[in-house]
Every structure is written in structure tokens, then in C-alpha cells.
């Protein structure tokens, strides 16, 4: 939801920052790696019960994650390799952060509570897979109530107010599952709609029709000549 509404505006505002970082020697891959390291530190802090420190590190994790794309676009170095690295790093960061939350809940509230972050992780992996699969087939699966940006904000809120951490996780799980349904319905509708033919296929069919028409005209002319 946040990505769909404000992502393009945020990227436009971050381009000058990206150019400045690029001149300073920063690359998009280095920023992605830095965000991954910060996610490791945040997971360790959360797992050990330092939720306020985990919140601060979570915020610091989001800064390189927001700037790596700006640096890549500002320097003209956006590549498929970098996009894959960034996407994989995001999935690893999600696993680390929610794993840290699971470790904390297992030590404080028992084993059953630790399953909740893993349920959120599984649901978030589902919506990521839906988008990747849809884009591979030429469809658009972006959007939904609980995308990665919303999950990060919600998790930060739960860390800041630790008494609400479990209710926040339940809310994240519910809204992430709703997002999965929203994306599935969106792609289902696109896949069910009649798709325009490819230009090459249109040209080939037009050529076949033209040949058939020309052949029919030649046959008519031949039959008229024989009749005479």
C-alpha cells in the first residue's frame, strides 16, 4: 500500500541523495550488504530481549534499504544482478528479524508464541512469491494492505511497545494473509481477461489471411478463363 502510493515520490526525492552517496564512493551493492549486516545486529538484539535497541537497529536497517535503489538509479548502475541481490537480501532480513522475535518470545512466553513470527514469515513469503510469479508471467501483483514497508512499520511499533508485540504480530499475520488473497484475486482477474495478441502473431495471421485471399482470387480468375 505504501509502495504503491508513495514509492515513486520517495524515489524521486532520494535521487539527489543517491548521487551524493555515489560521488562519495558508495555503491548500491554495498548499501544492500550494509542493510543486511544491520538486520543481523537487530535480530541479535531482539533475540536477547533488547527490544529498544532492536527498534533502533531496525530503523537503521531501513536506511540502506531505501538508499540502495536511489544510488543505483542515480549512477545508472541498476542491473538485474543488483535487483536479485536486493530482493534476496530483503527476504534474508525478514527471516532474521522475525527469527529474532521468535527467539525472544520462546524465551519469555514459551514455544507456542514463537510460532507466530514464523507464521508471519510464511505469509510474507507467499505474497513475495505471488508477485515474483505474476511478474514472470507478465502480470502485475503489486499492492495490498500489508506489504514489506507496512510490516516493517508494524514490527517497529511492536518493538517500541513490547506489551503490544504479540497483538501486533497477530495483526500482521491477518493483514498479510488478506494481502495474499488480494494479490491472488488481482492476478486471477488479469489472467482471465482476454489478452491482446502479440505483434508477431498478428502479423503472421494477417499474412495467412492475405495469402488465402490472393489464392482464392487466383482460383476465381482461372475458373473464369476456363469457362471462356
Image (cartoon, rainbow, N blue to C red):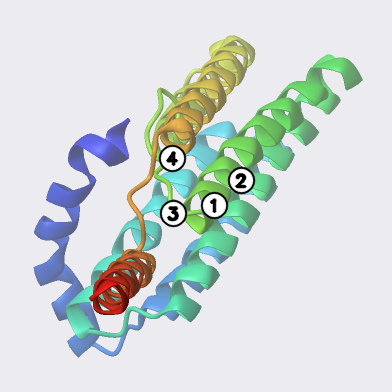
As rendered, which of 196 and 202 lies closer to the eye? 202
Q: Earlier in the sequence, mark 2 or mark 4?
A: 2
In the picture of the structure, the residue carrying the numbered disc 4 is: 141
Q: Residue at x 20, y 73 (%)?
A: 18
| Other residues around mark 2 within 10 Å, as few (<14) / some (14–19) / many (≥20) | some
Report the side of 101 relative to 111 (left or right). Answer: left
Query: What separation in Å lies between label 2 and label 1 (alpha carbons)?
Result: 5 Å
As rendered, which of 55 and 210 lies closer to the eye? 210
In the displayed image of the protein, which residue is found farthest to the front? 228
In the picture of the structure, the residue carrying the numbered disc 2 is: 129
Contact between labelled residues 1 and 2, with CB atoms less than 8 Å apart: yes
In the displayed image of the protein, which residue is found farthest to the right? 111
Label 4 or label 3, whichever lies nearer to me, is: 3
Report the side of 81 relative to 224 (left or right). Answer: right
Query: What separation in Å lies between label 4 and label 3 (alpha carbons)?
Result: 10 Å
| Other residues around mark 1 within 10 Å, as few (<14) / some (14–19) / many (≥20) | some
Q: Position of residue 76 (x, y in %)?
A: 23, 84
Query: What separation in Å lies between label 2 and label 4 (alpha carbons)?
Result: 10 Å
Q: Earlier in the sequence, mark 2 or mark 3?
A: 2
Query: What separation in Å lies between label 4 and label 1 (alpha carbons)?
Result: 8 Å
Q: Above or below — where is 22 with respect to 159?
A: below
What mark, if any, has residue 138 been given in the picture?
3
Label 2 element class? helix
Q: Earlier in the sequence, mark 4 or mark 1?
A: 1
What mark, if any, has residue 17 been given in the picture?
none
Q: Position of residue 127 (x, y in %)?
A: 57, 37
Report the side of 3 relative to 80 (left or right). Answer: left
Query: What separation in Å lies between label 1 and label 3 (alpha carbons)?
Result: 10 Å
Amino acid at each position: 500500500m505504501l509502495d504503491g502510493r508513495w514509492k515513486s515520490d520517495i524515489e524521486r526525492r532520494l535521487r539527489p541523495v543517491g548521487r551524493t552517496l555515489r560521488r562519495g564512493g558508495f555503491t548500491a551493492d554495498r548499501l544492500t550488504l550494509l542493510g543486511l549486516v544491520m538486520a543481523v545486529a537487530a535480530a541479535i538484539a531482539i533475540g536477547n530481549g533488547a527490544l529498544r535497541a532492536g527498534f533502533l537497529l531496525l530503523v537503521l536497517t531501513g536506511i540502506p534499504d531505501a538508499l540502495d535503489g536511489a544510488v543505483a538509479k542515480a549512477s545508472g548502475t541498476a542491473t538485474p544482478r543488483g535487483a536479485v541481490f536486493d530482493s534476496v537480501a530483503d527476504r534474508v532480513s525478514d527471516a532474521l528479524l522475525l527469527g529474532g522475535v521468535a527467539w525472544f518470545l520462546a524465551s519469555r512466553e514459551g514455544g507456542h508464541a514463537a510460532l507466530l513470527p514464523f507464521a508471519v514469515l510464511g505469509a510474507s513469503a507467499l505474497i513475495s512469491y505471488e508477485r515474483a510469479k505474476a511478474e514472470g508471467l507478465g502480470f502485475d501483483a503489486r499492492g495490498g494492505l500489508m506489504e514489506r514497508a507496512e510490516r516493517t512499520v508494524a514490527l517497529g511499533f511492536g518493538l517500541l511497545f513490547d506489551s503490544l508485540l504479540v497483538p501486533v504480530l497477530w495483526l500482521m499475520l491477518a493483514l498479510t494473509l488478506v494481502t495474499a488473497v488480494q494479490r491472488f484475486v488481482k492476478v486471477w482477474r488479469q489472467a482471465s481477461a482476454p489478452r491482446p495478441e502479440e505483434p508477431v502473431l498478428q502479423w503472421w495471421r494477417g499474412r495467412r489471411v492475405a495469402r488465402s485471399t490472393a489464392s482464392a482470387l487466383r482460383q476465381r480468375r482461372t475458373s473464369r478463363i476456363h469457362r471462356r
